Image (tube, coloured by chain):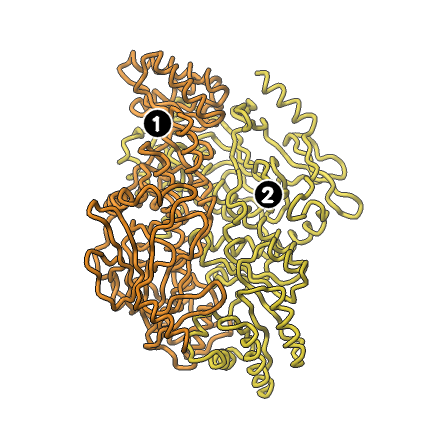
Chain colours: A yellow, B orange
């Protein structure tokens, strides 16, 4: 399989196509509204919206190719009429969505799509996948940034992300949420994200001894030398690094930093800090990597580790403590009829919706209200879902990644600490408007 | 970003390039051997090799494009000499690897690559990512197949895989490990995997009432009707399904199955089974989905659920209980010198290696021995690492997915139950040959 064939309308579950065919046979294709939202999650009290740009690009380019239709024909499941219908299908619906970088909460729609039901149904799998994955990682990354208390955090996850497209999404979502850079060079090229990286243990091992490896690196990258000092022993590695730093000073250069990658990071970092300070090298930074996530960062900073920057890898890149979100795409309205599912523990909220957000005078976020899309914006509140697509075309100028990143940072600062605690955080107040609640009662009675 | 740009040599960590540049400056480019293996994992006692075909295709097509080099130039990190060197770089090394579908264990190399160190280093990120992800999912899927005790298992994970390429890998790896089909239509098209799927709750909700939805579906897919019966209430859904099944019988058709997606699956499945049997519909199958993984499958079968087939989604698709493996790519030999890293808890085994496998007369796997590549195959054992690439070209005819699947099944049956238990499984005996052990002592003393 070639990677370029990953996208397109066949990136879908078969049942989307069988349902579409049943709608088609029955002549059912009236306008439907689907709501994309995340069900409450034990380990997440807030989410960071991401993936909208990718989702909209997918919708805008969504067409069945000749080879797609050939394959579907060979399945012997679909009628020629239905296949001819698919051949001419384009997305012609409208989308309202939260801007990327918006903080949101469980049960709030992050996106609503309205289109003839056949189209709307066929788009389910890809929308859930695209927005869900990007949002899951942006959320995990925001937690790491929060735990790091202003210290630099860098994405080192590429080797263990769940595949190639995940690697790109992780670089983008983590940068959006405040990471300073990524090790992913392709993300640097394609997304303009700053790239970062120095050396691995294999590099040090390829030389006869550690100091030769350090010297070769300092000669190649005199402006940006960070030396990995734990291949043999962290303390003797620090001594070698100081020797090389002195040689660099003699040539008018300076060592940028050293990196720790194993052992007791709190103790070792303080010990290395004292060695560097003792050599007059207060400006040489200490980087650390190895199994970091928000919990390990918080723990090390609580234990007064002398670490200036964290390389955060695998556990962020797969959102290891919550590797999936219960994100769903539910029919809430069909042909002017509001609908809801009543299955135990999986009930949905009928009706096209909006989310209103209130803040106090100082700008702190105070409350969200899930309401009907038709309700007026309450005074002092703002509506989070904005129209972004109509008639199948993108109708807004989407913000660039730097703007999204700034907007997220500003809003994150306005979310009270108690909602951001890594464990045992308070639930942000989210209520349902009286009109939306009434609609549920009416729909339940139908 | 376009998906077709995901692959290629920039799918790498920046430090691979900075290390390569330092080797280049220093004139270091002798032959290196790197070993790809998985460190011991608390929740996995065996692994299922997968991803080799994708990895070899990547190696065979690995070239820096003009736009890749332009981007690297703009970083202002690399010299013109080094960039000119990259421009002409192709992979010219050799690879030995376990066939896909091979069962293997912690610390055993699943792949070894030998090439000039600059090439070998630059390939690290993509090899770890490709083989690691595919192997992680094949392993998780094998656990689900084992738990299902011969009942059908189908991949329903696409909507929550970690991105698009993950969705393709999951479909392939789960099929390789014995899943019967996937919901991923693109995997059907590109990989030839059987596809499966019927309807969602939104489909039922789009109709005025449940029975109309069932009738419309039965009319569209008379050969393959599976009805989702829990949108409103599972028992009344089963009654409606029986009504529609009778209507189908009158027209000379039969209902293939019903699907449960919520509630107490053990109790409900038995209740629905009795209803179907009471209506003379012993041949109508009961499908179940909703949060399945190997543990839930085992639990339900232990509780005598009357389920014929399991739709397994998210938890398999992200390997939820182990969403990453500690898979590493370590330098073990450079320029005729065997090397090892000594960092605490991360020590490596020096030397190019082979894995020998023994079995008893009945074919049951009894023991693995990690040995030097240069050792002769012990009598009665077989070598698991085979040459697959030389001079940068694929030298074997890689098995197709169906063959890999059959080979895996045969070997999995020969692995004793005690090594396959979902929890508390015994560790398969893996030892290190005396020659390999001696080499470690010699290398440690250097």
Closest to the observer, A206 or A428: A206
Closest to the observer, A273 or B41: B41
- Going by the image, does A272 lie left or right of A207? right
Chain of the residue where label 2 is placed in the rendered structure: A
Q: Position of residue A255 (x, y in %)?
A: 58, 78
Residue A217, label in figure: none
Identify the residue shown where x is 46% and y is 61%.
A186
**Which residue of the protein is positioned furthest toward the right in this rendering?**
A361
Q: Quadrant of residue B93?
A: bottom left
Q: Position of residue B182 (x, y in %)?
A: 35, 38
Q: Where does label 1 land, which residue?
A: B308
Give the structural element (helix, strand or loop) at label 1: loop
Q: Position of residue B304 (x, y in %)?
A: 39, 25
Vertical placement of residue A436 versus A388, above or below: above
Residue A43, label in figure: 2
Vertical placement of residue B340 versus A366, above or below: below
Give the structural element (helix, strand or loop) at label 2: loop
Vertical placement of residue A317 versus A378, above or below: below
- Image quarter of the C terminus of chain B: bottom left
The number of numbered badges drawn on the structure is 2
Residues at marks 2 and 1, CA–CA distance in whole angstroms = 34 Å
Identify the residue shown where x is 32% and y is 63%.
B112
Closest to the observer, B105 or B182: B105
Q: Quadrant of residue A43?
A: top right
Q: Is residue A415 visible?
A: yes
Closest to the observer, A103 or A208: A208
**Label 2 close to label 1 by CB (< 8 Å):** no
Q: Position of residue A379 (x, y in %)?
A: 76, 36
């Amino acid at each position: 399989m070639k990677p370029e064939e990953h996208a397109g309308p066949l990136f879908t579950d078969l049942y989307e196509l069988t349902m579409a065919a049943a709608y088609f046979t029955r002549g059912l294709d009236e306008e439907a509204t689907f709501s994309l939202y995340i069900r409450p999650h034990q380990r997440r009290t807030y989410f960071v919206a991401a993936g909208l740009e990718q989702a909209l690009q997918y919708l805008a380019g969504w067409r069945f190719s000749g080879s797609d239709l050939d394959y579907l024909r060979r399945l012997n499941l679909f009628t020629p009429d239905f296949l001819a219908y698919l051949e001419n299908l384009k997305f012609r619906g409208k989308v309202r969505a939260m801007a990327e970088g918006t903080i949101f909460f469980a049960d709030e729609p992050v996106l609503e799509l309205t289109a003839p039901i056949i189209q709307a149904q066929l788009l389910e799998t890809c929308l859930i996948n695209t927005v869900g994955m990007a949002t899951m990682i942006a959320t995990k990354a925001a937690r790491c940034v929060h735990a790091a208390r202003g210290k630099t955090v860098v994405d080192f996850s590429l080797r263990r992300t769940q595949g190639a497209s995940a690697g790109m999404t992780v670089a983008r979502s983590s940068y959006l949420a405040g990471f300073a850079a990524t090790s992913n060079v392709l993300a640097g090229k394609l997304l303009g994200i700053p790239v970062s990286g120095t050396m691995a243990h294999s590099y040090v091992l390829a030389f006869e001894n550690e100091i030769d490896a350090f010297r070769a690196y300092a000669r190649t990258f005199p402006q940006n030398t960070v030396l990995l000092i734990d291949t043999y022993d962290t303390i003797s590695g620090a001594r070698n690094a100081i020797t090389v730093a002195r040689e660099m000073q003699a040539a008018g250069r300076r060592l940028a930093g050293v990196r720790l990658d194993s052992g007791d990071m709190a103790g070792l970092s303080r010990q290395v800090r004292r060695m560097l300070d003792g050599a007059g090298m207060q400006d040489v930074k200490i980087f650390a990597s190895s199994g970091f996530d928000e919990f390990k960062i918080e723990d090390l900073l609580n234990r007064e580790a002398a670490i200036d920057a964290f390389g955060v890898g695998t556990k962020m890149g797969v959102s290891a403590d919550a590797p999936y979100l219960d994100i769903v795409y539910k029919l809430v309205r069909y042909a002017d009829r509001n609908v809801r599912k009543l299955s135990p523990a999986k009930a949905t909220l009928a009706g096209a919706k909006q989310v209103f957000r209130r803040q106090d005078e100082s700008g702190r976020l105070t409350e969200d209200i899930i309401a009907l899309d038709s309700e007026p914006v309450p005074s002092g509140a703002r509506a989070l879902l904005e129209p972004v697509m109509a008639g199948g075309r993108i109708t807004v100028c989407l913000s660039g990644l730097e703007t999204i990143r700034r907007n997220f940072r500003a809003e994150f600062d306005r979310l009270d600490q108690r909602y951001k605690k890594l464990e045992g955080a308070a639930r942000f107040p989210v209520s349902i408007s009286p009109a939306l609640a009434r609609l549920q009662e009416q729909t339940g009675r139908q």
